[in-house]
Image: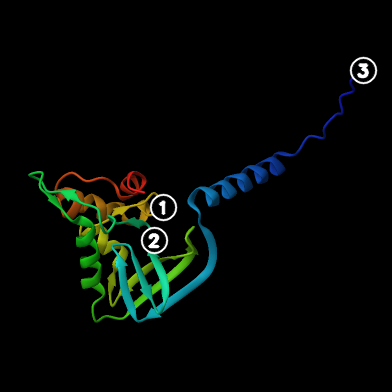
Amino acid sequence: MWRWRRRRRRSRLQRLADAVFVCLAAGALIYGVSRLPQQSYEGATSVIDGDSLRVDGEEIRLFGIDAPEFSQSCNTADGAPWTCGRAARAHLRSLVHSKTVTCTSHAVDRYDRALSRCRAGETDLNAEMIRAGLAVATVEGTALYGRAEAEAKAAKRGIWQGDFTRPGDWRERNR
């Protein structure tokens, strides 16, 4: 005969703490992000693509934005293809050219790149790439850059002038 052991009931606070822990762990796994103490980077800068650069030898990913991949094409309003990925990289290069770049990072992504908000002089690089219509706001970046994205979209700047595939979707299709 089976005997059922009576389980001790967990308090609401214990259950809430468990639920919060599970959500945080799942979020870290889903986004591939781990938290770090705040770090700053400043120094010689080279642009990798529209949302990545190397500052003083450290690979940086601009937090909260996703730019078209270097080999990605988009369409103009009349349907003609244009190299939006190359345009994104060129614009980021123009923003950092001959300026001191400073990045502040709070996390790393699954590729071990520092996720950062960066400035070139007084220019917020993350926001400027969105404002120029050469990047979209990610889920994490919507609170910071949603308004700038809406402005770029309304003004039909960059990728918003015609049809384009979101960079994340383009990567999935072109692995």
The image position of residue 137, as x and y in percent, is 32, 53
Residue beneath disc 3: 1
Q: Is residue 12 above or below residue 139?
A: above
Q: Residues within 10 Å of mark 2 (few under 14, many from 20)?
A: many
Residue at position x 54%, y 62% in the image: 35
* First reached walking from the N terminus: tag 3 or tag 2: 3
Q: Nearer the viewer, residue 84 or 25?
A: 84
User: Which residue is farthest right?
Assistant: 1
Within-10-Å neighbours for mark 3: few <14, some 14–19, many 20+: few
Q: Secondary structure at mark 2?
A: loop
Q: Label 1 sits on what residue type? A: Glu
Q: CA distance from mark 1 to mark 3?
A: 54 Å
x and y, in percent, of residue 46 in the image: 31, 75
Residue found at x 31% / y 81%? 100
| Relative vertical location of residue 29 with respect to residue 62 in this rendering, above or below | above
Give the residue at mark 2. Answer: 63
The amino acid on which the numbered mark 3 sits, given as a three-letter code, is Met
State which mark lies toward you, 1 or 3.
Answer: 3
Q: What whole-number distance in Å separates the C-alpha atoms at marks 3 and 2?
A: 59 Å
**Amino acid at pointer 2:** Phe
Q: Are marks 2 and 1 in contact (CB under 8 Å)?
A: yes
Residue 88 seen by the camera: yes
Distance (Cα) linking label 2 and label 1: 8 Å
Asked if residue 46 lies left or right of residue 28, the reply is left
Name the mark on residue 140. 1
Taking the spot 12% from the left edge, 48% from the top edge, the residue there is 76
Mark toward the start of the polypeptide (2 vs 1)? 2
Q: Secondary structure at mark 3?
A: loop
